[in-house]
Amino acid sequence: MEINTFGLSGLSDIQVKASREKYGTNVLSYKKQNAFLDALKKIIKEPMVILLLAAALIYFLTEKTGDGIFLSLAVIIVATISLYQDSRSRNALEKLQDFSQPKCSVIRNGMVMDINSGDLVIGDYLMVEEGKSITADAVIVHSNDFSVNESVLTGESLAVYKDSSSDENLIFHGTTVASGLAIATVQAVGNETRLGRIGKSLESIKEEKTPLELQINNFVKKMVMVGGMVFLAVWLINYLRFPHILDSLIKALTLAMSILPEEIPVAFTTFMALGAWRMMNMGIIVKQMKTVETLGSASVICTDKTGTLTENRMSLTKIYALQTNEICDVEGHVFDSATQEILTLGMWASEPIPFDPMDVALHDAYLKNSSEDERHAFHMIHEYPLGGKPPMMTHLFENSHGQRIISAKGAPEALMMVSHLSEFQKQNINEAIFSLAKEGYRVLAVGQASFEGDNFPKNQQEYEFSFKGLLAFYDPPKKNISAVLDAFYAAGIAVKIITGDNAQTTGAIARQIGFRGAEDCIGGDELMPLSLTQLGKKVKSVNIFTRMFPEAKLKIINAIKANKEIVAMTGDGVNDGPALKAAHIGIAMGRKGTEIAKQAASLILLEDDLSKMVDAVAMGRRIYTNLKKAIQYIISIHIPIVLTVFIPLAMGWIYPNIFSPVHIIFLELIMGPTCSIIYENEPTEKNTMLQKPRPMTSTFFNWKELSMSIIQGLVITAGTLAAYQYAINDGADELITRTMVFSCLISANISLTMVNRSFFYSLFTTIRYKNNLVPIMIGITVVISGALIYLPPLASFFGFRSLNLSRLLISIVLGFVSVVWFELVKWRNRTYQQLK
């Protein structure tokens, strides 16, 4: 449908270019910090880097130049990897920000078009409507029922009504439209807007750390403290045995390096940022990073009906006329005077510039079925916005001859309350409503009033209306919605419908799509008086909530949260904002969602497709599971490194210093990429969406999983120490012993990487998972490790010696066996699961 531009042609392409060149772009640009330097400063403060620099300095002081150069190069390599991971994460987040830039509507070249807000220029006619964000400062030239929420600038939460004829005719960047529609001429863009001038305050706002991030940081801090205490103890032991201060310091630094799990925070940042980037490629914008870790715990999804379960493609299908007490089809029907009057009144009660799907449908039907278009002959002289419980709206129009039209539309209950109807008429209307609603139609009532003079009543309910009839719209269910619901149910996620529509229409749609609990519902007015205890029980047993208004929606979300559920809430309208904000996961619709809904939400579905939420939950579970695999791997592999360094020293074995800093840093360089590259790229396990949601109360480092990682690490330690003792008993010297222990540890590292790809499925299953990085990373590890042992210059530098085949095989088998036993644990878990 062609949108009315009220005779405004807007700027031409040449004028747009000239305005942009003269006044600049509509971008808020503040002083930006140097991300590279910030990342570099962060790296320099890392405990591992500090230890490496200290060890390199000691080597240089003791004239061990080769070792000093190696550790200096190691610092560069570690810094390069960290900077790469940081830039990778930052680039992913910047793409998200660019992708989620708001759109705006402008009149240019006599047409209404959608553009990126950054392309807006001074002189543009900006068209803003209910729920949209205002993207520049502008002066209103036309408006109807227009109010703005300016709390971002003023702190005042109440909406301010504005129009072109009053002092309140300016709108400002960053504010949102609470109701109605306006066309305004852009006066300021970018830093010259009011928001731009006070924007410096935005720079000081710091993002809060998520609960998972705090858990990880606390764990790493504790390990740093442990490392510090062990460092001092080992330094003292070494110094008492061999009173050489710098040599003792090197040995203590070696152990301290092996304890620090610096890969964990790097893995967390990488997994979260790349997870958000992956979701963006799936058509899901993640606005808040904490959402990624919360998704896997979602246990209840509250969804609107219109636009989420249905297409939000309203078509006027049937009209009921009270005068004739008949329901007629719109398509292929020749309208009588009563039916035509109801259609025309419905159009007048709609917005003059329609943006709501029902208003658009009414304007379209009016044009199609009317012999003469009278819209240009009348102008609006007064209006009453959508309000009341149940809601209705009223418009007053007048032409040049003084002829007046007063038309209202809204919930049938609302129009029936303000009309004089006999009991017989009420019975006929209710029968018609029930007949239409049970087939899934959305029903609106239409009424007409008369009024002389200009002293209009304060409230629309004060008019004496004549009830004319009903308009029935059909919004078909989405084709894939039944499969989407089945996927949620299979994942252990409950689904609840929260809608402003009536019970009959919602129940009919629910039955059509196979919704569980379609037979029971509760209305907003019935829900509000309930106590917290009563409401808590009700939200557990009831899955359909009808005739809901913002306060009722918010009350439902809070009641579900009080039941210790993790709530996801979908919404697209202005009145969904509070509930979206209150939900653990607020989900806004990208196409038809209002800017208010998008601002309140933490996720945006670009295609308004709820099936993407199934993908998002699966991705959230995948990211959480893979991050847990990575961290359990880090803990498991750190334990044998620490104990292999510490036990020979503490026990006074023949070769007490089996590893030096150069060996530790090499092992660190293997572990870092393994955890953050291989595990991040792991696919979703096939049983992921068949498990119950993870309780939000469960901590990331729970004792059961932590103890399993510790046991894995201790068994690997037993394998490396067995290799040590075998070498000694076989008459090997220190170089051969070190090489066998190192080879055993590399074998265990590779085996652990493969085995821990799943804590449920066997190695024979996971080896078929599609992850191209697994063979690449393992191949690189094997080649480099082989070079260190069998290339004389490298072997000499690292203190290794070439192993014969039997010693090499023994080292590899010991490393493999020290890990593969975990397959028996997984087999037991699978057997137990099948027996349940």
Image (spheres, grey):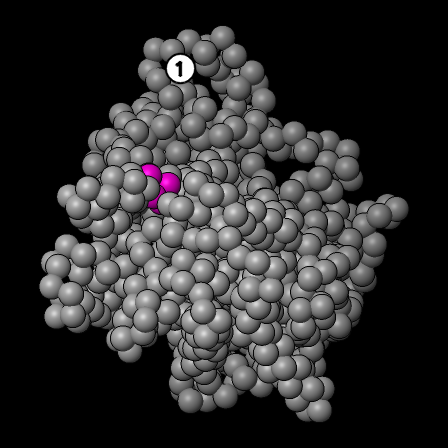
What residue is at 45 percent from the left and 24 percent from the top?
119
Q: Is residue 351 above or below residue 467?
A: above
Q: State the image coordinates of residue 527 (x, y, percent, origin top left).
A: 49, 80
SS state under label 1: helix
Q: State the image coordinates of residue 433 (x, y, percent, origin top left).
A: 71, 68
What residue is at 60 percent from the left and 64 percent from the top?
806
Q: Is residue 359 left or right of residue 325?
A: left
Q: Nearer the viewer, residue 404 or 294?
A: 294
Q: Is residue 66 above or below residue 451?
A: above
Q: Amino acid at mark 1?
A: Arg
Picture quarter with the C terminus = bottom right
Q: Nearer the viewer, residue 294 or 80?
A: 80
Task: Give the extent of the magenta segment.
Answer: 73-78
**What's the magenta bit mostly, secondary-structure-wise?**
helix
Q: State the image coordinates of residue 28 (x, y, percent, origin top left).
A: 32, 30
Q: Nearer the viewer, residue 543 or 520?
A: 543
Res 88 visible: yes
